[in-house]
Image (cartoon, rainbow, N blue to C red):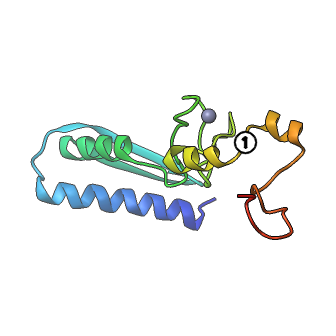
Amino acid sequence: MSTPHSADVLAALREFVARLDERDPGAPLVGELTLGLGGAGERLALRAPVARALTEALRGYHDPRDRGTCAHCGAGRLDDDFVCRSCGIVNGLFGQTLAGFVPPASQQEVSGQRGIAGADRPDGTLGD
Ligand SMILES: [Zn+2]
């Protein structure tokens, strides 16, 4: 069954091939593109310029949801807030700066205090 989404993909591919073939109709044929989506299909001649362009486009694509790899642990992927999903560290200079203001969890448990130093003082001073 054809869906609006699959029709868009097939139309975009057809238009892409036509646009590039128009510039160089005598380019050598290197194969055939066959794509089937939702019961609809498309078979298009694959010429060298289209093959090159598709390869570049696919390899150069960057998913906007991909925030990169954690610089701290090197393996975890970052979420939309640039927090590593593996180690929980906020990535980058901002994350390192922020982490410098927060005592390690082990110190928080020992002192029993959390938050901004001095904020719990009734006179609002930092004790100096
Ligand atoms: Zn990490």
Which residue corresponds to the image point at 57% horizontal and 67% vertical from the top-left? 4
Q: Is mark 1 within 8 Å of ligand 1?
A: no
Residue 57 shown left or right of residue 78 in the figure: left
Assign the C terminus to one quadrant of the image: bottom right
Which residue corresponds to the image point at 61% horizontal and 50% vertical from the top-left? 98
Residue 119 shown left or right of residue 49 in the figure: right
The quarter of the picture where residue 29 lies is top left
Q: Quadrant of ligand 1?
A: top right
- Mark 1 residue element: loop
Q: Nearer the viewer, residue 120 or 27?
A: 120
Identity of the amino acid at label 1?
Answer: Pro
Q: Position of residue 53 (x, y in %)?
A: 26, 46
Q: Position of residue 69 (x, y in %)?
A: 53, 37
Residue 69 shown left or right of residue 127 in the figure: left
Q: Nearer the viewer, residue 113 or 105?
A: 113
Which residue corresponds to the image point at 75% horizontal and 66% vertical from the top-left? 125
Residue 74 shown left or right of residue 22 in the figure: right
In this view, the residue farthest toward the front is 128
Q: Position of residue 26 (x, y in %)?
A: 9, 48
Which residue corresponds to the image point at 68% horizontal and 34% vertical from the top-left? 87
Residue under pointer 1 = 103
Q: Is residue 13 above or below residue 35?
A: below
Q: Count how many numbered circles sit on residues in the image.
A: 1
Quick one: label 1, few (<14), some, or many (20+) residues within 10 Å?
few
Q: Nearer the viewer, residue 112 or 55?
A: 112
Q: Is residue 15 above or below residue 72?
A: below
Assign the N terminus to one quadrant of the image: bottom right
Q: Is residue 91 above or below residue 10?
A: above
